[in-house]
Image: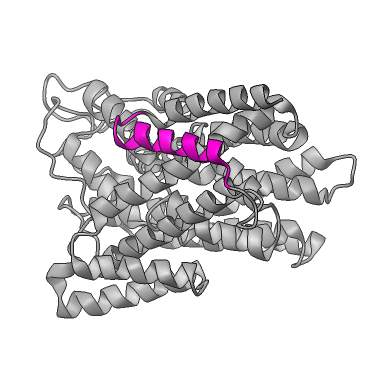
Amino acid sequence: MSSSTENRTDTVTDDSPPSVSFWQAFAFWLKLGFISFGGPAGQISIMHQELVENRRWISERRFLHALNYCMVLPGPEAQQLATYIGWLMHRTWGGIVAGGLFVLPSLLILIALSWVYIAFGEMPLVAGLFYGIKPAVTAIVVQAAHRIGSRALKNNWLWGIAAASFIAIFAVNVPFPAIVVGAALVGYVGGKFAPDKFKAGGSHGKAGKSFGPAVIDDTTPPPPHAVFSWSRLSLIIVSGALLWMVPMGLLTAVWGWEHTLTQMGWFFTKAALLTFGGAYAVLPYVYQGAVSHYGWLSPTQMIDGLALGETTPGPLIMVVAFVGFVGGYLNAFFGSDAPFLAGAVAACVVTWFTFLPSFLFILAGGPLVESTHNDLKFTAPLTAITAAVVGVILNLALFFGYHVLWPKGFEGNVDWISAIIAVGAAIALFRYQRNVIHVIAACAVIGLIVKTLMG
């Protein structure tokens, strides 16, 4: 850990804010971990307000520059942005603390809520709350498809890619990784022959505002640790490889390759590298693996897990911790008398392998990004992948809708009460732009009332 003197990145302007110590930053990142509700947009908005406007730790232009890089990467962009800014201010440990505290509170809260869900989910109170939450989640996923689609589908080529990806996963059940690879190839070829059609996305706008001089200002040179060097890059790559191989090797040596924990580590490593477009994009892949292939949890439990993820702080991809906990709890591989321990360990294993690549991408790529302050753009393959993600998310919405509205399958009756709740949630989200947390809370209360009246 560097000293406060080494961490200084003051500008020469007289009214610049004072330099920020490591422990001042630590306190902020810890606070952020507990208040980072609202998904990526809400989390990025909180960081912008706190770090750019109020505290002036980083300038608007440098903030957007870092954000554009994080948007290009697979993984949760808000968590990676926190890691990037923490690394820029206080070297490697600053990045680890910022990114780690963004995730840790959510992990602990989700372990507790997952235990309540799996142990007491059949109780009338819990069942009633989830009865109202499930239709709300369906509306939230539809809104996510609309939000990403309105931003990404700028021309008929991209609409076509979205439609093709929907057909591929809905009608043909093509694995999500294959859809990502196919979209990337289409984007690569299309970028050569029709570059104007693949320029959508990639930037959150130009930095046109100034909130006064910042600790890391527009003209502040990159600190020494942010200057690219092959030796530092090699060290990060080797360290990252060891941080992956040692836990995976231990899991394999102790329990074997086919054990639930080992397979979770391997599966979520792959998932971590496929999260282009955010958590909603990777959820179909998690469903295909965790529900259909491995059977770690049921379709209904997957929907409930997303509901819990929506109501806790931290990145939405933390729903993987719920998947891990339920899979470990039900497998009870530490014995029938310790299902909670199995669930908690599985949740931690899943979280480790899901987020490790995010830290490595930032620590390895940050110096390359700091070498230029020009705006980054999505490449044509990434533009095509973003378009494909829209079709995949639409399929996810249909999947949720089917299990919520026809809980006993198409041979059963439609759950009209759930349908009404879903429509009401959609109106609140689309027409009145209500906060996701407020919509979920209202629907949970409605569900509890309905279940109570129905006896």
Q: Residue at x 34, y 72 (%)?
A: 184
Where residue 264 appears, as percent x and y from the top left, is: 66, 58
* Left or right of residue 276: residue 59: left
Where residue 271 appears, as percent x and y from the top left, is: 53, 60
Q: Nearer the viewer, residue 58 or 139?
A: 139
Q: Residue at x 43, y 41 (%)?
A: 140
Does 426 appear in magenta? Answer: yes
- Image: 368 above or below 445: below
- Image: 242 above or below 316: below
Where residue 37 appears, as percent x and y from the top left, is: 43, 30
* Left or right of residue 124: residue 105: left
Where residue 410 appears, as percent x and y from the top left, is: 60, 57
Q: Which residues are magenta?
A: 414-434
Can residue 424 be seen here?
yes
Residue 7 quadrant: top left
Q: Nearer the viewer, residue 155 or 325?
A: 155
Q: Residue at x 20, y 74 (%)?
A: 191
Q: Nearer the viewer, residue 60 or 132?
A: 132
Count of marks overlaid on the render: 0
Q: Nearer the viewer, residue 254 or 434?
A: 434
Residue 303 quadrant: top right
- Magenta region, main secondary structure: helix
* Left or right of residue 337: residue 200: left
Where does the C terminus fall, quadrant-wise? top right
Colour treatment of the image = one colour
Does 42 appear in magenta? Answer: no
Residue 156 quadrant: bottom left
Can residue 32 be seen here?
no
